[in-house]
Amino acid sequence: MFPIILLLFIAVPIVEISLFIQVGHVLGVWPTIGLVLLTAFVGASLVRSQGIQTLMSVQQRLQQGELPAQQIFEGVVLVVAGLLLLTPGFLTDCTGMILLLPVPRAKVARYLMSKMTLTTMGGSFHSSQGGPFDHSSQDGRTFDGEFERKDDDNHRLR
């Protein structure tokens, strides 16, 4: 893994510099700089709107009692897309824009989910049929109770 990351840290800047030189030769210096700034601003606004949609999807899944794993991983991909769009360069901007599209983002999120394993300390992960908000005990008994809120004004320390 380390050699791949090292290679990316060397190769990506070299590709970006060569693209800057080529685009700058065709368009000129100031239009090239303007194009980089424009992609950063447009990308940031797109990441914001896509992020809000993903957050709403997460909330909806939670209200249904489901685990929003796909949406959480898509949120991570959106963060990466935002970082790529804010990084100056045409290669990183193109990659970030591709990650903003719903289909590639979902595929990348599914790939990341397939590479992750869920482990807990002190035991294994158990799922219940009632969803994450099922408060049943292990032997099937459900505990129910009532509470009363008391006014704390009389018990304050002075």
Image (tube, rainbow, N blue to C red):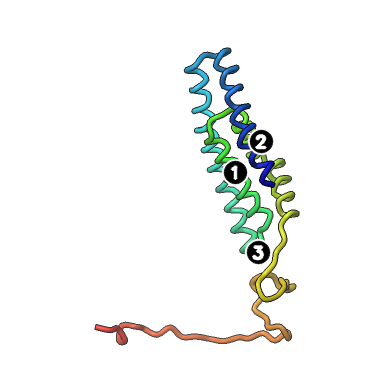
Location of residue 78 with respect to 87 vertically, above or below: below
Q: Residue at x 59, y 48 (%)?
A: 53
Q: SS of the residue at dot 2? A: helix
Q: Are marks 1 and 2 in contact (CB under 8 Å)?
A: no
Query: Mark number for residue 80?
Result: 1
Q: Quadrant of the C terminus?
A: bottom left
> Which of the two discs, 1 and 2, sits closer to the camera?
1
Residue 109 in picture, x, y percent from top left: 69, 49
Q: Residue at x 71, y 71 (%)?
A: 125
Sequence order check: which comes first, mark 3 or mark 1?
3
Residue 101 in picture, x, y percent from top left: 66, 38
Residue at the left extreme? 158
Is 71 or 19 nearer to us in this picture?
Answer: 19
Rounded to the nearest angstrom, the CA distance separating label 3 from label 1 is: 28 Å
* Amino acid type, mark 1: Val
Is 58 or 72 nearer to us in this picture?
Answer: 72
Query: Mark number for residue 98?
Result: 2
* Amino acid type, mark 3: Gln
Q: Residue at x 31, y 83 (%)?
A: 153
Residue 60 in picture, x, y percent from top left: 62, 58
* Amino acid type, mark 2: Ile
Location of residue 91 with respect to 64 vertically, above or below: above
> Which of the two discs, 3 and 2, sits closer to the camera?
2
Report which residue position mark 3 lands on: 64
Query: Mark number for residue 5?
Result: none
> Which of the two discs, 3 and 1, sits closer to the camera?
1
Sequence order check: which comes first, mark 1 or mark 2?
1
